[in-house]
Image (cartoon, rainbow, N blue to C red):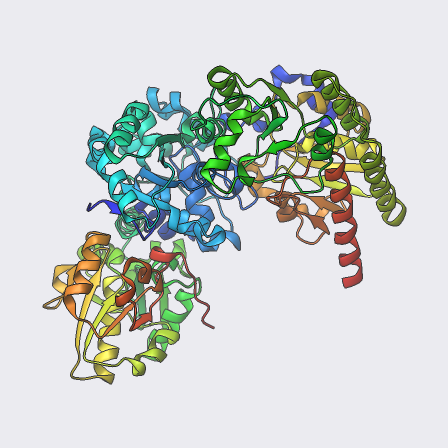
Amino acid sequence: MKSLLKHLSPFAPDQSGAVSALFEFGGLIVICDAGGCTGNICGFDEPRWFTRPGAVFSAGLRDMDAILGRDDKLVAKLQAAMQDSDLAFSAIVGTPVPAIIATDFQALKRMAEKRTGRPAITVATTGTHHYDRGASAAWVELFRTFATERVPVEPGTVGVLGASPLDFSCVNAGTHLSRALEKEGWRTVRCYGMGAGLDSVRTASAAERNIVVSPAGLAAAKHLEKTFGTPYEVRCPWIPARTLDALPRIAGSNVLIVHQQFAANALRECILSIHPGARVTVASWFLMEPEFMREGDFPIPSEEAFVEAVESGGYDAIVCDERLRTALPRSMRDGIFDFPHFAVSGRLIEEV
Amino acid sequence: MNRAYSITAAELAGRGVNDIPPELLSSANLVYSSPATLAFNSPGAQGFGVKRAGLAVPGSVMLLVAPACCGRNIAALGCEASLAERFFYLMQDDTDIVTGRHLARIPEAVKEVCESCEVKPSAVMICITCVDALLGTDMERVCRKAADYAGVPVVPCYMYALTREGRLPPMASVRRSVYSLLEPRKKNPAAVNILGFFSPLRDNCELYALLQSAGVRAVREISRCRTFEEYQMMAEANFNLVLNQEARYAAADLEKRLGIPSIELVRLHGTDRIANQYKLLGRAVGAVFDDSEPRRQAEAAVEAFRAKHGRRTFAVGEWLNADPFELALALVRYGFAVSEIFGTVGGANFVYVKRLAELSPDTRIHSNLSPTMMYYRGRDAACDVVLGRDAMYYHPDRPGVPWNDERQPFGHAGVRALFEALSAALDGKEAAR
């Protein structure tokens, strides 16, 4: 059955992606839930929570709130929490509950802005999609709300879009990405959401170029290109060293990479530089942008489809999060190289 | 709102249970889900939430029928508890959560799950979430249909976070679910069940010996049942001992279905109170319990701690195996000070607040869930020893005991173990200095 997971556990959902994107910007984030979704996000999907807990709250919805659609009560709670604080904005993130009762997020946004006197962002996530969809929507809303002013372009300044611990399995990914771009000659690197804060978002038009490191950042890059004419390129300048170190050990010429598309594409180039004749296919459980797919690349719609693809693909090596090993029959578990993906396994790597 | 709200025990008691300040009521505010609160703010986040609790039935597996977001943290639970192989997921999409069309897939999914298991499960527990609460799903009916189709008992577990403060909160409901497979059986006057927890009492708890002294030969807990057959033996009990009020509903259901009456005990930390409770239990079952030796050992542990470490000042949290207000009161009655409590005040524990107000009126009470806890800074707190994982989060620099082991402390043995653990923590901290 397509929607049945028998060996894997669910991947990071859209609401986790939205919170991850917004986490470092100094706003008050309200997850529009009864408590469980917030527990999953703060307790699992946001590894920065344990070292830098911020203003992330549950709306604490109860059955009658949902049945009666008490948006005014939610906004009153939000106003109380914002009062006397120096929080720059509020963000309301959706879950299955508002999806079922058809909450009007635009109305919530207006109500929140009116009551708090500060900008509000709403992300109508439903909990049924993957993290990258939620992150993508949150990035776009963030830039739409705050990057409204055109400032002079600063030569040597580059923006990084789409970085999060969910994508890179590392709470220091921003530092790694920045270092890699500085080595290329960029003087100022703004890794949004992982180092660069709200002031950088406000002056996003100062970037000479944006680098999109995951599909979650693509819509925001397109928005910034349309609004300010900032060009963007899709590439991932940093791959964890432990994954790169394993590549020379890959034997055979038919390789499958399973990860977020842009990181997987970057790794494909690394493999091809070591094994020039190899056939390297990229697959992903998450967003696959057709313009960045090569022939043979494919999306993975289900656990069942993943097993079938591996069975029929005849791969000599699979580079993926090790957690995916459990989905495969024992006879197919050899030749797997670990490429951690927090959104899949919830595993972090430590890279200094 | 840029400092953490708190109120003294005297002020709170003076207002009364019907005038608890809104700052202490989670329903009146956004809920702060700090690392201190994750275990209990979410019915499935950590520890024994509905998902893990539902698997208390030996040999069972769980099918979570929900959007992906609801099952995300199971990866963590599974790793910790080697439970991963017992969890399965039927994912709901956008159309499912609006139309309920996923219900038609459940019987087939149950069958596929059973077929994929090396050993046929004893039961399939179906965990459903806020989605089906709002859709008004009749999951009992769906489970009956799935059971007929797959040839295995199928039981609903309601992880309805939306009803957490309602008449039947998720953790009370799941206790009923895990005992619902018990079938009528001839009564055994020498058998007793202990209800309330999903892990056993500590082996040295005197309750076992006291029951044996009254002629009880089989004391059963669900977490000690290794097989489904052992679990079924729980149906022969003469009575149930309820050690956690969240098991009241399950006990009432067992009384109605199987005719097993129940007696409720409270987890207490004052040895005099514990002794009195055993006396009352003895009267109820027609026995005289001699708890003098475990009581002496508990009081000796308290005295040894006091002699070595003096009159310490405690901070008491609620992420621990105790009611924080009852525990704080017991500490005060033992002669210690309690500077602050992180807890949820309600009708059930307000009696302890009133007594604390008499003995320790300046003890400050915080709500872990208050959004103002974002501003809490523990540096200036007067406590020099900390109890509870949440309190330890607030005071990482003070010696403390999390006191939230899965093995459940109870009675005199619990008090003794607590003070031994406190001594070890303080000895360790002081040795480290």
Q: Is residue A94 visible?
A: no
Q: Residue at x 43, y 53 (%)?
A: A24
Q: Residue at x 53, y 35 (%)?
A: B222
Residues A264 and A2: in front is: A2
Q: In the displayed structure, would residue B78 be above or below residue B128?
A: below
User: Residue A217 at what x, y percent from top left?
Assistant: 26, 57
User: Residue B281 at what x, y percent from top left?
Assistant: 72, 21
Q: Residue at x 19, y 35 (%)?
A: B95
Residues B411 and A238: in front is: B411
Quarter where residue B270 is shown: top right
User: Residue A295 at what x, y percent from top left?
Assistant: 9, 68
Q: Residue at x 39, y 46 (%)?
A: B86
Quarter of the figure that contains the C terminus of chain B: bottom right
Left or right of A73 in this view: B93: left
Left or right of B58 in this view: B409: right
Left or right of B261 in this view: A201: left
Quarter where residue A71 is shown: top left
Quarter of the figure that contains the N terminus of chain B: top right
Furthest toward the right, the residue is: B307
In this rendering, the count of numbered labels is 0
Q: In the displayed structure, would residue A188 be above or below residue B405?
A: below
Residues B100 and A97: in front is: B100
Residues A75 and B258: in front is: B258
Q: In the displayed structure, would residue A339 be above or below residue A272?
A: above
User: Residue A181 at what x, y percent from top left?
Assistant: 33, 74
Left or right of A301 in this view: A51: right
Q: Is residue B224 visible?
A: yes
